[in-house]
Image (cartoon, coloured by chain):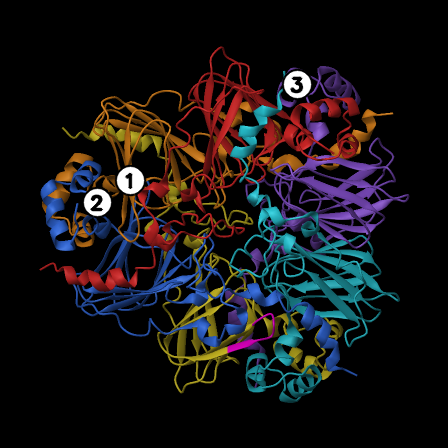
Chain colours: A yellow, B blue, C orange, D red, E cyan, F purple
Amino acid sequence: MFHILFLLPLLLSTSHASVNDFCVADLKGPDSPAGYPCKPPVKVTTHDFVYAGLAAEGSTSNIINAAVTPAFVAQFPGLNGLGLSAARLDIAPGGVIPLHTHPGASELLIVTEGLVNAGFIASDNSVYVKKLSKGQLFIFPQGLLHFQLSYGKSKAVAYAVFSSSNPGLQILDFALFASNFSSSLITQTTFLDPEQVKKLKSVLGGSG
Amino acid sequence: MFHILFLLPLLLSTSHASVNDFCVADLKGPDSPAGYPCKPPVKVTTHDFVYAGLAAEGSTSNIINAAVTPAFVAQFPGLNGLGLSAARLDIAPGGVIPLHTHPGASELLIVTEGLVNAGFIASDNSVYVKKLSKGQLFIFPQGLLHFQLSYGKSKAVAYAVFSSSNPGLQILDFALFASNFSSSLITQTTFLDPEQVKKLKSVLGGSG
Amino acid sequence: MFHILFLLPLLLSTSHASVNDFCVADLKGPDSPAGYPCKPPVKVTTHDFVYAGLAAEGSTSNIINAAVTPAFVAQFPGLNGLGLSAARLDIAPGGVIPLHTHPGASELLIVTEGLVNAGFIASDNSVYVKKLSKGQLFIFPQGLLHFQLSYGKSKAVAYAVFSSSNPGLQILDFALFASNFSSSLITQTTFLDPEQVKKLKSVLGGSG
Amino acid sequence: MFHILFLLPLLLSTSHASVNDFCVADLKGPDSPAGYPCKPPVKVTTHDFVYAGLAAEGSTSNIINAAVTPAFVAQFPGLNGLGLSAARLDIAPGGVIPLHTHPGASELLIVTEGLVNAGFIASDNSVYVKKLSKGQLFIFPQGLLHFQLSYGKSKAVAYAVFSSSNPGLQILDFALFASNFSSSLITQTTFLDPEQVKKLKSVLGGSG
Amino acid sequence: MFHILFLLPLLLSTSHASVNDFCVADLKGPDSPAGYPCKPPVKVTTHDFVYAGLAAEGSTSNIINAAVTPAFVAQFPGLNGLGLSAARLDIAPGGVIPLHTHPGASELLIVTEGLVNAGFIASDNSVYVKKLSKGQLFIFPQGLLHFQLSYGKSKAVAYAVFSSSNPGLQILDFALFASNFSSSLITQTTFLDPEQVKKLKSVLGGSG
Amino acid sequence: MFHILFLLPLLLSTSHASVNDFCVADLKGPDSPAGYPCKPPVKVTTHDFVYAGLAAEGSTSNIINAAVTPAFVAQFPGLNGLGLSAARLDIAPGGVIPLHTHPGASELLIVTEGLVNAGFIASDNSVYVKKLSKGQLFIFPQGLLHFQLSYGKSKAVAYAVFSSSNPGLQILDFALFASNFSSSLITQTTFLDPEQVKKLKSVLGGSG
């Protein structure tokens, strides 16, 4: 009755069809507007779909008392082309993820430990801020300025998930004060006082 | 010097521009291929961007010893149009999220408690399975059959995040044995024995 | 009056503009999330836009009494990037295309010969089944389990057209019983009896 | 053992998730850039996924000895949002589908009867023409001028499938000579002789 | 010979096909993630495709000595769903369009009068700045902080064109200092000095 | 206090994240359906985001008394993947940009000098024509036949902006009469008289 041979033509004829089930990034290949070229399917293993880099706590022994550990396509090539990525946020008491944007993605925040105050500012300058506890979600629409900070007495941990495998991350203070954006242009385009600009550049290492 | 009045023309002229920063779902409106109509911006509040429904543990006192609690657009209207949604998985020891697909999204799994065995089957019938512990990620490409189960002695918790605000969820056993898909068509299209179909239909409540 | 020379600047200045009219796949290049790299336009000929591989009847001398002959991008490189592909279904009397999904595309079925019974199961376990005759169309939404079978006394032929140049094809029975998905995991994630699994694995060649 | 009650929470919690499996057009609702609003899921039946309007032969008793019968979203609401539509071409001997474009879709042609000569012109004015017989496919990239004609002694039938549920159809002769596009503007923008324009307008009913 | 009657079946059968050639926004309808519902095609006139609101010079008698006049979908409903919009920039000598982002679009700048200094900051804090004169173009990738200012002795005019019909506009200083974003949160998330925040809030009208 | 060292982990961990802020085309690489591969970020400079090629007037000393100067991705590689491109139109008095389509983009026209008569024809053969003056905008929906001509006594200049970095440009007269599209097929598929075809082919250089 049933006979294994009937499988051959079907399996052969669709042997290429699985290629686009996924497209694990070959990070050595050139990037493109749609992502990296695919690793040859024959070389793909289970490890390409797993990422352990967010299991360890990020160090918060720094000025912001916080850490952002990304699992973007550059760290987790299996995400390539699938419209998702993640980051782990560790925020010590008093720590803060400073105002920033993701130019290419919306962000869904999941608090898994501690207390997080999160918020964003919309195009019409409305401000949406909420204190979150474990298990609560917050959605930040694409490209808007937002922040997260710990407001409890113990450390907070959260996972940020993005609607792109490469969401980008532009931290406002770093863009202004850790870059070589000239102080003259900064004051002209932000109305900040030159002294303020000079002070933050000296802290954050900016030049220009 | 600086004068507040300069703001008026700018603010007025862009007063409508913020509408598409986000589009909180008006779930009473008709759905469309791109999602729900937007709630009027003037009625949007911070609560629209927050969801607390995943904070509570899902009940695992059921046959699969597991629970899937969704935070899709129907539960969390702020996700509308932003290409993201989530679900909380609670899996008691020995529990299992049976084989299923999400027809409209890829899934990124984040284990936050316990031990989870997860896997998927690709179009070319390759199988990718991995035992995961806390903090590890697994990516399931769109539309493929996959599962999660607890393999430890204590309960597992994980968050599944999706690349769509409405990813869909087709559970294989429910599609076959909890529906009114006729037993005759099931045996013809799956080669399962009629006795097997009958047995599972009686358990899962299927008819036809 | 009219003078051929006026053409030169216009034609020259737009000489590169035609590249993206189409992007015939260079199948030797690495795939990417958006498809294959383009064959150099200068090497493109009419043959790249034509495919004759569906003209011949597929052999139905097999266990399912049916054949699926694909015209996906791997077979018909001219489809690359254009969001379309096709397959020819030949179904002998009593033949069946078993339950399957296309993870990356919706499917429009056009019956051109004989009588076809077709159906799909939705996420909410609703079942949609219809007996079709020559010239009738059936649309299967993306990623859902569906089937086609012949219910007449003569052979049926149909064309399936997909909303992607590489829709994927996951046949349920092959995923479960022709793969190396372990029997233990199958029974845990489907509730099928071990005997049933063993029986179908022996027929379909699965291991594990 | 197995108990039906475990289904309740799962089924309830995902009861809205199936909405976007499909979105059958409510043609009375206003169209949008992404398509029509969805018919309420509770009113959807199998008939929404089936279309019989291409089963009948189109009349070729007209000046072009051919007929185009569309199955776009306006005729077949189940296609809404799924990125696919179709048309049936009936071409009597000597008949022709005049030069036309589909502004919003690529087209895959499947010849099912007779002999069809088909071709398109690319942006760089390259011409791709091929004589096709039964079972052969031809892909027309989006937005380019193309045609189909019968070159055999018997009638030809073909199905055109499109990468949009509403591909549009701009027939060159109708746009120029069956519209109220002023003759003066036509001669200025096409270099056709006024007499030619006048002649074709009188045939095709154009004014202006 | 030629006969007007042959047109009737063709024209009738495609009478709905033109709907999605365009989708002029009905701004009274609810917005959706894909844009506004379409104005009924029968009410569409040429005026829907024309916008004269950028013909007049914007007033630069304000603190920034500059004006941004938008032609987004809210002003120019014909743009709905077509992935394009525009704005006119008038910049008096010494004027500046302060640092801002467009959360939902890239921007192509075309200088048509005067001298413009333009620049943006990338995610890795690289700065790209260029002095532009009449007829030069500058492309600002989506979501990144950028600015334009006049550096000549006479007024500058430029057109900004966007890759969305509703690109959004988040002006950094307004988000921080013209909103009700609390001063405490600002200093925590930007490291600006409280005095600086207080000073700019008093100028720009912010509260909180 | 503030310490520069805190930056190191953050900056390092996101060092790859900026790649997809932009993807300047490497035009030597193979094109793909999503555009060209990216130039290595380390080689990108400000010049990649600037294009001066539209600053110079196009020569209108030709039969159409007009010029189209493109700034598509092939000329301005910084546009790659950003969904925008442009062209400069110079139209001498009496000049005309003949009927044409852009198969892959909608077009927004900005008149910056002189008087332009512009129009398009929709799928249902409706004609939309408008006389424009300086500063006025006209939107041409994707893929439809349209034209621009100068109707004033002095030269007109306009910028056309497109919703794709490679919109394509199919000029009707060139497609028909400057190609090798056979005269026999032209008359069959357009109903033009053979004499008309022959006359325009001799002017425009067509063969076949």
Residue type, numbered disc 3: Thr
Work out whether disc 2 and disc 3 sit on a shared chain. no
Label 2 sits on residue: B181
For label 2, count other residues whose C-alpha is less than 10 Å away and answer few (under 14), some (14-19) or many (20+).
Answer: many
Q: In this view, does D139 lie above or below D17?
A: above
For label 1, count other residues whose C-alpha is less than 10 Å away and answer few (under 14), some (14-19) or many (20+).
Answer: many
**Which is nearer the eye, A207 or B78?**
B78
Q: What stretch is highlighted in magenta?
A: A122-128
Residue type, numbered disc 1: Gly
In three-dimensional space, the C-alpha distance between marks 2 and 3, rounded to whole angstroms, equals: 55 Å
Under circle 1, the secondary element is: strand
The dot on residue F187 is 3
- What chain does mark 3 sit on? F
The dot on residue C119 is 1
In three-dimensional space, the C-alpha distance between marks 2 and 1, rounded to whole angstroms, equals: 10 Å
List x then y, in percent, for residue E33. 51, 58
